[in-house]
Image (cartoon, helix red, strand yellow):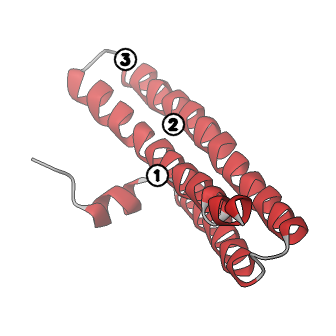
Amino acid sequence: MRMPFSEFITSGDLKFIIAFIIFTSISTTHLVKKYKTKSDTKLVTQHNLRINNAAFWNLILSIFSLLLGLMHSFYFIGKAGGIAPNLIFQGVSYALITPIFGISCYIICKLFSHIYNNSTKQS
């Protein structure tokens, strides 16, 4: 049984999801700008730098959201007064949603930074 994508997105921490979307859209904007100026290697390098910065912040926020999610889950497990397997598994699964989405956005941004690099190096 799989979790539907809509539940996957809505179960994550909304602050981090919005930040991931913002950074990924920044890298998409710079990908488009890089495509328009792919003949100028200096501008391509500048756009790659901005795309890599957005990817870096996606990765950092993913790690941060993982730590906060795990801390939040274990806090409520401790408040429950005992270890219930459903609390542990559900809490950890919800804590992993946002980092998975963030790492996916990181991979997309890193792919954006490599697009059109080979065409400029071969020319």
Disc number placed over residue 101 in the picture, else none: 1
Please identify, in this view, whether the residue under mark 2 or under mark 1 is nearer the observer.
1
- Disc 1 is placed on an element classified as helix
**Can you name the residue that lies furthest to the bottom here?**
36
Q: Give the x, y percent position of residue 16.
A: 59, 55
Whether residue 19 can be seen here? no
- Check disc 2: other Cα within 10 Å, few if <14, some if 14-19, many if 20+: many
Q: Give the x, y percent position of residue 104.
A: 47, 51
- Disc 3 is placed on an element classified as loop
**Disc 3 marks which residue?**
81
**Picture quadrant of residue 36:** bottom right
Q: Residue at x 65, y 45 (%)?
A: 61
- Check disc 1: other Cα within 10 Å, few if <14, some if 14-19, many if 20+: many
**Can you name the residue that lies furthest to the left here?**
1
Choose the circle earlier in sequence order: 2 or 3. Answer: 2
- Taking 67 as reference, is 22 above or below it? below
Give, as a three-letter code, the residue at label 1.
Answer: Phe
- Taking 100 as reference, is 7 above or below it? below
Q: Residue at x 22, y 29 (%)?
A: 86
